[in-house]
Amino acid sequence: MQRTVILASTSRYRRELLTRLRLPFDVHSPEVDETPLPGETPHDLAVRLALEKANAVAARFPEAVVIGSDQVADLAGEALGKPGDHARATAQLRRMRGQTLIFQTAVAVVCKATGFVQRDIAPVRVVFRDLSDAAIEHYLQAEQPYDCAGSAKSEGLGIALLNSIDSDDPTALVGLPLIRTCQMLRAAGVDLL
């Protein structure tokens, strides 16, 4: 019996990535508070939130295999969230110019009925170009990435902001590490092929 797969996310980017697997799935909002805990590292925040999202939806659908994911932009140990608006995105990109960030992209897969729980993280090392204020403004006007951790979309024009990307899971920077997700789904009994 193939269990229902649910993506515990409101992110259109994660939904688009999961669609690549050609696997039927449902989407439900996890409704999790994403506020960092005092002293929590960006790595630990991403892992905790991915698991909390998966658990929140799995509690409502215990027979399903639930995928939770979270991404935190890590600038020298400081978590940079989604900017939400133009002014905060401008400030973020100004701080990030010429810097190396680690995008901590975590994924968790949970099935309450079987007791299955796995979580992992796919860190992505990104080096930003030394961007001028004019380049930052042009980019933000063109793409308006206000719902993206780190104020940039590498799958679009945001790639022009970068000098390099280093990752062993190429979709992790967009928001869902599909290699790790596939490994976890197989371990949970979901046949992808």
Image: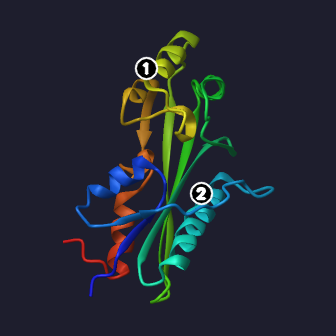
Which residue is located at x 44 percent, y 35 percent? 153
Mark 2 is surrounded, within 10 Å at the Cα level, by few (under 14), some (14 to 19) or many (20 or more) other residues, namely many
The residue type indicated by label 1 comes to Ala
The secondary element bearing badge 2 is classed as helix
Residue 167: in sight, yes or no?
Answer: no
Mark 1 is surrounded, within 10 Å at the Cα level, by few (under 14), some (14 to 19) or many (20 or more) other residues, namely few
Residue 124 is situated, as x and y percent measured from the top left of the image, at 48, 47
Give the label, 1 or 2, closer to the camera.
Answer: 1
Residue 9 is situated, as x and y percent measured from the top left of the image, at 48, 58
Mark carried by residue 46: 2
Mark carried by residue 94: none
Residue 33 is situated, as x and y percent measured from the top left of the image, at 68, 58
Residue 68 is situated, as x and y percent measured from the top left of the image, at 49, 64
| Cα separation between marks 1 and 2 | 28 Å
Work out whether mark 1 precedes mark 2 in sequence or the reverse, and give the earlier one.
Answer: 2
Apparent side of residue 16 relative to residue 192 in the rendered image (left or right):
right
Which residue is located at x 35 percent, y 59 percent? 178
Decide which of 188, 121 is in the foreground and name it. 188
Which residue is located at x 50 percent, y 60 percent? 69
* Quadrant of residue 30 within the rendered picture: bottom right
Q: Quadrant of the N terminus?
A: bottom left
Q: What residue did someone put label 1 on?
A: 142
